[in-house]
Image (cartoon, rainbow, N blue to C red):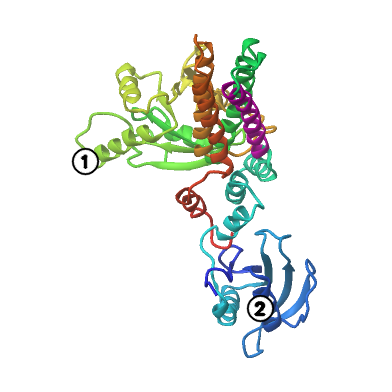
Amino acid sequence: MDRKSGGIIAVSTAIGRSGIGVVRFSGTADLAKLLVSRMTDIGTPRPRYAYFTAVRDGQGGVIDRGVVIWFRAPHSYTGEDVIEFQTHGNPVIQNTLIKVALEIGGSSGLRLAGPGEFTKKAFLNGRLDLAQAESVMDLINASSESAVRAAERSLEGTFSDSCQNLEKLLIDLRTNVEAILDFPEEEIDFIREGRIRERIGEIRSALGKLLLQAGQGSLLREGIVIALVGSPNVGKSSLLNRLSDREVAIVTDVPGTTRDLVENSIEIGGLQVRLVDTAGLRATDDIVEAAGIRRALSEVERADMILHLVAPETLDSAGELKEIKGRARPGTPVLTVTNKIDLLSEVPSGNESHLYISARTGYGIDRLKERILASVGFRNSVQGVFTARRRHIESLRHAEASLDRAADLIREEPCALDMVAEELRIAGDSFGEILGEFSSEDLLGRIFSTFCIGK
């Protein structure tokens, strides 16, 4: 027998001690029955029935007592026969249980599971498409309520259904175009009436809406990094503390207090934000401070957004702002924030790229949070939003580009319908990549290697 065909086993709950721990097996029906008969007192189990039983070793000794459930194929998470051993969450108990199972089932091909292998089996056996499979890990790693809800929508198939619907529309349209190519002598009014151009426009519009939702989902999943940058003593650390609602960084009146990066993660309107307080930018002969400034500029290059802090006493920040923008990645939002406005008798109104706040009193902080969300394109309402990954966004943009090329081709005279059909095929393949219909083994390996063992 192929040693890979028998089954896999692993701990499916978090590492450490807990009240309950789950060891999961997935594999053939024969191996499932063997493990139940040799390791429990159940006898002949009923599918999807929870048994409280002793879990035994190969000599009949009791390892622990707990709940054992058998999920018969195909009605299981992986589509294979699955057994869950729910015992006390002690790693010693769980490791002993797995050791015994491997001794019993090793000759039948039982082995330890690799990262994400249970979910990979679910995908390969048609229980989940690839986008749904990826959302499993997103749900596990979600760090806010909004992210949890978005991941749950993806797992339910919201994103997949949208992709499948657009894929079907593309297939239908391509079928009509191919019919015109195959039967040029027939009276087909589809192209003469402008229906192809109209249908491409409709699909392109729906894709634009899906891209917007996917962009929101990507922000929810990954969050953003904001670098607090500026001269010494403009209040970067004070702003970090104010946004964090606690004393994260040391604040003094001495310029150059912050020498290294100080980070903290917060949530703004459902969006995870990692704030990075950096060393003040200035010319210095201090070796330690100079190293901190180099790190600050490196952080500017990595940040998703930059808050350029200045203060009323700052004489000239134009050169500093120019250097910051020159270091930042193209398209990175840079917002100038004048702090310490509580020292002014009159506060300027500000604009979209320049805000006035007081980190000490809290003035303007709510407005700053709104500008942060608006600058990265995140809406406070995430109703209907699902999680999406960078590869999903890239595939959707590839489909968008193909549709735009098809729209341009259909306007030309004479119209190259064969090229239109090819662009429609490429656009459809982009959706297939998201759903896993045309995914390579290398891609699957990269995706599932990010999962935890036992999932």
Q: How far apart in space, not on screen, are marks 2 and 1 (Cα)?
A: 64 Å
Mark 2 or mark 1, earlier in chain: 2
Q: Where is residue 70 in the image (x, y as percent from the top left)?
A: 73, 69
Q: How crowded is mark 2: few (under 14 residues within 10 Å), some or many (20 or more)?
A: some
**Disc number placed over residue 259 in the picture, else none:** none
Q: Position of residue 159 (x, y in %)?
A: 64, 37
Whether residue 89 appears in this view of the structure is: yes
- Position of 121 compared to 235: left or right? right
Q: In this view, does 388 lie above or below 210?
A: below
Q: Residue at x 53, y 29 (%)?
A: 399
Whether residue 357 appears in this view of the structure is: no
Which residue type carries mark 1? Answer: Ile
**Disc number placed over residue 287 in the picture, else none:** 1
- Magenta part of the protein: which range? 159-182
Which residue type carries mark 2? Answer: Leu
Main SS type for the magenta part?
A: helix
| Helix, strand or loop at mark 1 | helix
Q: Position of residue 234 (x, y in %)?
A: 39, 27
Q: Which residue is drawn at 54% across and 14% down?
A: 410
Residue 397 colored magenta?
no
**Quarter of the image that includes the N terminus:** bottom right
Q: Residue furthest bottom?
A: 59
Q: Residue furthest left?
A: 285
Q: In this view, does 337 lie above or below 223?
A: above
Q: Do the residues labelled 2 and 1 touch (CB within 8 Å)?
A: no
Disc 2 marks which residue? Answer: 35
Q: Residue at x 50, y 15 (%)?
A: 408
- Res 14 → quadrant: bottom right
